[in-house]
Image (tube, helix red, strand yellow):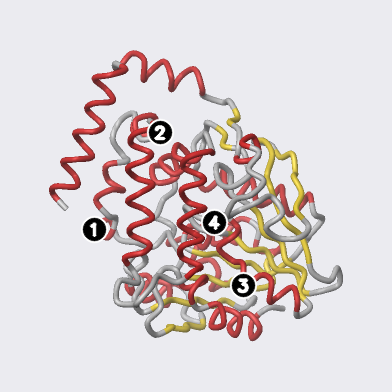
Amino acid sequence: MAATTTAVATAAASVLALVGVKKVYSAITAERGLTLPSLRAANLLKCAYPEDYYPGGEYAELSYGETHFFLFGPEDGKKIVFVHGLSTPASVYSNVARHMAANGCRVLLYDLYSRGYSVGPAVDHDPVFYVTQLHELLKHVEWRQCNFVGLSLGGGIIAAYAHRFPETVLSLNFIAPGGLLSPKEIPWVGKIFLLPYSEEIFSHKSIKGYFSGKNVASMRAEFKDLKEVPACIEEAGEILKLQFGHHAGYARGLMSTLKMFPLTALRAQFATAQAHSFPVQIVWGTKDTVIPGTTVETIQELIPRIRVTKVEGATHSIVMTHPEAIIRRLEDYIV
């Protein structure tokens, strides 16, 4: 770990030495408020995550720019919105969303700002930012109420959304949700991102390449005991590299989220669910090293009525590797 930290620090210092602090500062101030292009600008017709990955793909012009979304399944079906996590876009729900739609549900998936085909605004990626995107998208598709599913960062987003708009919630379904970590559980890399100018430093081509490789390697490492890495994980790795390489706002969006989204401070937002009558559940994998078991304990303290499902042997990639477990829980809980 020390060697890796040193390597990152050295790389960051090299970038600063190369472009100079003044130029970095100019880059920051010049781009504030601008909207950056998404994968759409790269015209990638054949890739791991094409624009037509799911049926019903569209774009909505929202306050911070275009949001790419998919809406499919029977129009009179039970409504479910899926909110993905920090790094992988809406593709992460492939097996789950397709199954739910094929079995009578109306599903809505979208790329968070700075991911996939949604634009990457040069603004703080905080809870208000993400809640605003979700709220405006639901208004765009004219959904007044629905079931919410949130994975990792998406879990924190739907908790914040339900806190602000509880009247829209039919059920809350958390999958290894972010927002309840203790400070000591934040990984070392997350602390590096709190350094000044980190968003611009880590958007530099050479450092983006380094972190792209490290992220893919860490995903594969979860399955080192298997003979081969599952195909769904390989696909997710390709999509991650695609975003790092072709989405101009991707790296900066990740850095801004890690800086501005309170991964340790959403207790109040989660706790308000206890006061409402809509169903609430959490699904978590017992081998998840990103969201530890302490999050499950904390959420049980905050929402005593919550239903807890622990999936033996599942990692943080649970939605991709154990879709049947997620499907069973959703079929039991959606309204």
Query: Counting residues from the N terminus, which is met first, the one under dot 2 or under dot 1?
Result: 1
**Mark 4 crowd level (few <14, some 14–19, many ≥20, 10 Å Cα):** many
Q: Earlier in the sequence, mark 4 or mark 3?
A: 3
Q: Which residue is mark 3?
A: 95
Label placed on residue 203: 2
What residue does disc 4 label? 157
Q: Which mark is residue 171?
A: none
Tag 3: amino acid: Asn
Which residue is most to the right?
76
Mark 2 vs mark 4: give the one in front.
Answer: 2
* Amino acid found under the numbered disc labelled 2: Ser
| Label whose residue precedes the other's in the sequence (1 or 3) | 3
Q: CA distance from mark 1 to mark 4?
A: 22 Å
For marks 1 and 3, give the CA distance: 34 Å
Q: For the residue labelled by badge 4, is the local secondary structure a helix, a strand or a loop?
A: helix
Secondary structure beneath dot 3 equals helix
Between marks 2 and 3, how big is the CA–CA gap?
Answer: 32 Å
What residue sits 36% from the left and 20% below the top? Answer: 24
Question: For the point 75% across and 69% down, which residue is it?
Answer: 79
236 displayed left or right of 131: left
* Residues marked 1 and 4 touching at CB (< 8 Å): no
* Closest to the observer, 268 or 194: 194
Disc 1 is placed on an element classified as helix
Which residue is rendered at x = 74% and y = 39% of the image?
61
Q: Is residue 53 left or right of residue 5?
A: right
Q: Position of residue 49 (x, y in %)?
A: 60, 53
Residue 213 relative to residue 119: left or right = left
